[in-house]
Image (cartoon, grey):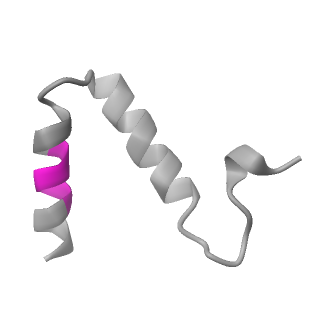
Amino acid sequence: MARCLLSEAIRLFKNGRSNDDIAAELTAAADNLDDDNPLIFIRP
């Protein structure tokens, strides 16, 4: 199920975003999966 949702999200992203932009978005999401740690972009 998750793979289908991810595939659909990527398909929609491809309508107006570059592959590098999509990769950066997915990397940021993966880097922030741990709910016990603060988000990377707001760490001091």
**Quarter location, residue 19:** top left
Q: Is residue 38 above or below residue 15?
A: below
**Mainly helix, strand or loop, the magenta region?**
helix
- Please identify the quadrant where the N terminus is shown: bottom left
Coordinates of residue 2 in the picture (x, y in percent):
20, 72
Q: Which residues are magenta?
A: 6-10
Give the image location of residue 33, x and y in percent. 53, 67
Taking 22 as reference, is 40 above or below it?
A: below
User: Viewed as shown, does residue 21 lie left or right of 34?
Assistant: left
Whether residue 18 is situated above or below residue 25 in the rendered picture:
above
Per the image, is 44 magenta?
no
Between 29 and 42, the residue placed more toward the observer is: 42
Q: In the shown orientation, is residue 20 left or right of residue 19?
A: right
Please report the residue visible at 39 percent of the width from the left and 47 percent of the height from the top.
Answer: 26
Q: Is residue 13 left or right of residue 39?
A: left
Q: How many marks?
A: 0
Q: Residue at x 48, y 57 (%)?
A: 30
Residue drawn 18% across and 51% down?
9
Position of 2 with respect to 22 (left or right) is left
At which x and y percent is residue 23?
37, 36
The extreme right residue here reads 44
* Residue visible at 32% across and 34% down in the picture: 22
With respect to residue 34, does 31 lie above or below? above
Q: Position of residue 42 (x, y in %)?
A: 76, 48
Q: Quadrant of residue 14?
A: top left
